[in-house]
Amino acid sequence: MGQQIETALRQSIQRIVLVLVHFLPGILAFLLAVVLFALVGWLCAALLGRLLTAVGFDRRLAERPGAGAPALLADWSPANSPTLLATRAVFWLCLLVGVVVGISAFDASYSADTQYSALLLPYVAHITGAVLILIAGTLVARFLARSVLIGAVNAQLHYARFLSLGIKWLVLVLTTAMALDHLQIGGSIVSVAFGILFGGIVLTLSLAIGLGSRDLVSRSIERSFDFNKTDGKTDAPAPRPTEVTTMVEPDSAARSEPVASLRHF
Amino acid sequence: MPPVDPIAAIPEPEPPPSVAEDATGSISARAPATLLVALPVLAPDALQSTLTHLAAAFPDESLLVATPDSTPDAARQPLPNLRLLPYAAEGQPARGEAPWVLTAEDYAATAALVAANPALQCILLLGETAPALGPALLRSLADCIRSPHGLRTPPGAQAIDLAVPRLQLGPGEGLVNAALLYPFTRALFAANIRFPLPANAALSPRMAQRLALAAERQLALRQPRALLWPVADAAIAGYAVRELDAPGLLPPVPHENDFNALFAAILGSLFADIDVRAGYWQRARNPIGPATLPTPSPLNADPQANAELDSKIAGAVGSEIAPMIESFRLANDNLQELWALVLPPQSRLALKRLAALPAATFDMPHSVWARIAYDFALAYHLRTLNRGHLLGAMVPLYLAWAASHLRASAAEPTLSAAHIAATAAAFEQERPYLVSRWRWPDRFNP
């Protein structure tokens, strides 16, 4: 009995060691490829940086009259330096090539009869895709949340923060559902849960805005009713502080009376 | 301030004296024109009025008047000393419908004519408000460029290359200009020009050519309506700029109705210009310094007079200032997360204190406003935040300044100019703060 257990354990350990022996060279090859290409990228970036600095690439680009693309390039470059942009692009390109080569080496180090490679590599791709979806979703959520927050504050909506948070969580929930779907986790449960959650958030926002703005809407209707009843002889609503004076006929040189007493411009 | 019809305020111009004509009825052979007037697309009545003013302003000399091709022939009634000509050949930039201030398209179109007429000494680049410019102002603008010191020009005197009208506005007018455009231009470019974004200007030929280069860059980016900053350009080139009083002339009115979009467009253009010219304004130069300011009248011993003053301020606070302060307080509650990315803790603390003040004593200190404006200019340069978000987040802060300004000048409108001058002086005093933060942003980052 004891001998049988010992034999079984020994065989298990042998199998684990065997798997490790097959697995470790692949990992090593992957890391080696990434490190090697990172070094190459760093070297290429440094050489390119020195070369572009020597020829005054940034200055020449800035001095080119009437050049649209170079100006745009400089505008989008880190620290307004197209040289820095070029060197960083070269470095990250080399690193990306290193990762691709490393994955290929990792795949090649497996024997053909193992199923790990066939299962693992596509899933790694799925995980990468899901991570990218999450990153993009987070960025979009933050951008939209800020846009809504600033727009709502400048429109003097007192529930600006609530609106902003609502938009942010809507996008984040949508992104998470997409990422889970991409990872093939949960199947239809995720879709159904997402539908319920998304619908719930929209309904909550609608109710909140509707109930919160009830007074505003009723006042607006009352005002329009009074306006019609008195044939337009009613006090005009007070202008917002950011109201801009306008002309009746923009094309004509004749200037109309300003609609507000303030002139910001 | 009640609106004044600028044309009605100016006496009717006398008819121009007759110009010697030859037997064929045309004006006799005259010297090449030295003055070019560049007009935008104007309505027929407005065009005719402008041409009449020009003829009256320059009765004894011939003018070149550039009008867009779209001007109807009926409006091209010949006046003795005016020669109308189209803008440029096909493919060249041409002026279209007048924007509310001069844009890249206007400068580029005019430069083409300057190149074709080497005898020119002065260019009057007029915008939408051209019909409101009376003969006296037109004459003064042109003379400022051609003979800035009169007939007796002292030897070595510097020529004027840019002349712009100086509008006389009420306390509630031109607030963005007073809060940001004028203080930035004065502090960073040492140019005490009250309206650095002109709707009408007089240029020397070399100034026109210089502005055309900047305009071409914008046209290459397909942005013909981009704003240019001629005062900053002149300062960098070492050209002299002068402002001429234009009493009764109203400020141009933007066609755009969206305040936030306009604010972002103008301020974005200003910050981009400051970013491009950082190498210039970081160098030390003599500040203009505080001007002679009207002092506030001392408190009246009569309690009834003081009560009247208080009620005057309270009325202003209730009608115009209160919504601005409310907007600022709302932003103070909601935008702290964004302001924290841009403003250092001291500025945010000052804003919190400001938000807690009642409307009757609401007053943003000049130095706080100057530092806030500089911090936003730096954040625009560093892209700390999406630029649209950044400019949007600045709107409530501007409203806080505007509320302070209106409150300060509610009791006595003459204090408006003093408040604007004090703001500009604070920008000058705080310039080293901007230079330090610009050079070492990490050291000062909030």
Image (spheres, rainbow, N blue to C red):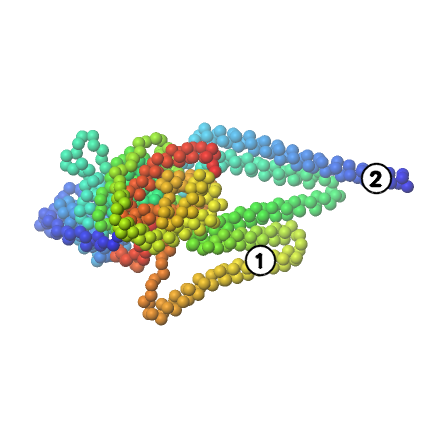
What residue would you read off at disc 1?
Answer: A198
In the rendered image, residue B429, in percent from the top left (x then y), is placed at: 35, 35
Q: Residue at x 26, y 46 (%)?
A: B301
Looking at numbered disc 2 in the image, what kind of residue is underneath it?
Answer: Leu
In the rendered image, residue B321, in percent from the top left (x then y), is placed at: 35, 52
Q: Are marks 1 and 2 on the same chain?
A: yes
Q: Chain of mark 1?
A: A
Badge 1 or badge 2: first in the primary sequence: 2
| Left or right: where B410 falls relative to B326 | left
In the rendered image, residue B33, in percent from the top left (x then y), is placed at: 18, 43
Q: Residue at x 36, y 49 (%)?
A: B360
Q: Check the image and name the residue furthest to the bottom.
A: A229
| Residue B216 visible in rendering | no
In the rendered image, residue B243, in percent from the top left (x then y), is placed at: 24, 41
| Left or right: where A244 falls relative to A100 | left
| Residue B11 visible in rendering | yes
In the rendered view, tell whether residue A228 sits above or below residue B97.
Answer: below
In the rendered view, tell whether residue B398 sits above or below residue A199.
Answer: above
Q: Quadrant of residue A42?
A: top right
Spatial distance from mark 1 to mark 2, Cα to Cα? Answer: 52 Å
Please say if the residues under marks 1 and 2 sit with CB atoms less than 8 Å apart. Answer: no
SS for callout 1: helix
SS for callout 2: helix
Q: Residue at x 31, y 33 (%)?
A: B287
What residue would you read off at disc 2?
Answer: A9
- Closer to the camera in the image, A230 or B47: A230
- Closer to the camera in the image, B34 or B59: B59
Q: Residue at x 41, y 45 (%)?
A: B354
